[in-house]
Image (tube, rainbow, N blue to C red):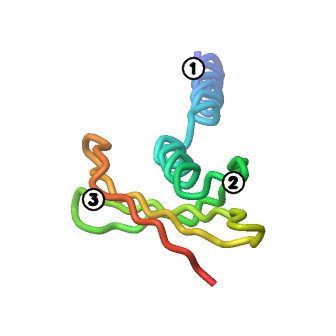
Amino acid sequence: MKKWLLLFSIFFFCLNLGQAGAQQPDYEKFGRIAISVVQEDYPGDPVKDYVYKGRKNVSENKVADTFQFTVADQGKQKQVLVTVIHQTDNDKVLSINVEEVQ
């Protein structure tokens, strides 16, 4: 009986790991928002990808997700950081900051 219980426990544990791996990262929604903002600000080349730089806590229920893009602006490559500040309890976007970095 204990063998079957152990076997079923391992099976369900592995099943849960598989489902967790299939979930989208929680910053993906805000990455799509950042892509839209960069596409509007730098309409030259299409945005293909970004680098997620991380999340910082702003307050108890607010966080800032930062994304780095390489864009072409008048033939020059520029690095652009987009920071999306949002609430953690309802994912409401509070502000979006776009900054060129050297």
Mark 1 / mark 2, whichever is N-terminal: 1
The nearer-to-camera label among 3 and 2 is: 2
Q: Position of residue 62 (x, y in %)?
A: 27, 59
Residue 51 in the figure: left or right of residue 54:
right
Residue 66 in the figure: left or right of residue 18:
left
How far is the residue under mark 3 from the one under mark 2?
33 Å
Give, as a three-letter code, the residue at label 3: Lys
Mark 1 / mark 3, whichever is N-terminal: 1
The nearer-to-camera label among 1 and 2 is: 2
Q: Position of residue 26 (x, y in %)?
A: 48, 44
Residue under circle 1?
5
Residue at image position (58%, 23%) is 12
Residue under circle 3?
62
Residue 23 in the figure: left or right of residue 59:
right
Is 21 in front, or is 56?
Answer: 56
Q: Position of residue 87 (x, y in %)?
A: 27, 51
Query: Mark 2 and mark 3 in contact (Cβ < 8 Å)?
Result: no
Give, as a three-letter code, the residue at label 2: Gly
Residue at image position (48%, 45%) is 33
Residue under circle 2?
44
Mark 3 / mark 2, whichever is N-terminal: 2
Q: Residue furthest front?
A: 74
Residue at image position (57%, 66%) is 53
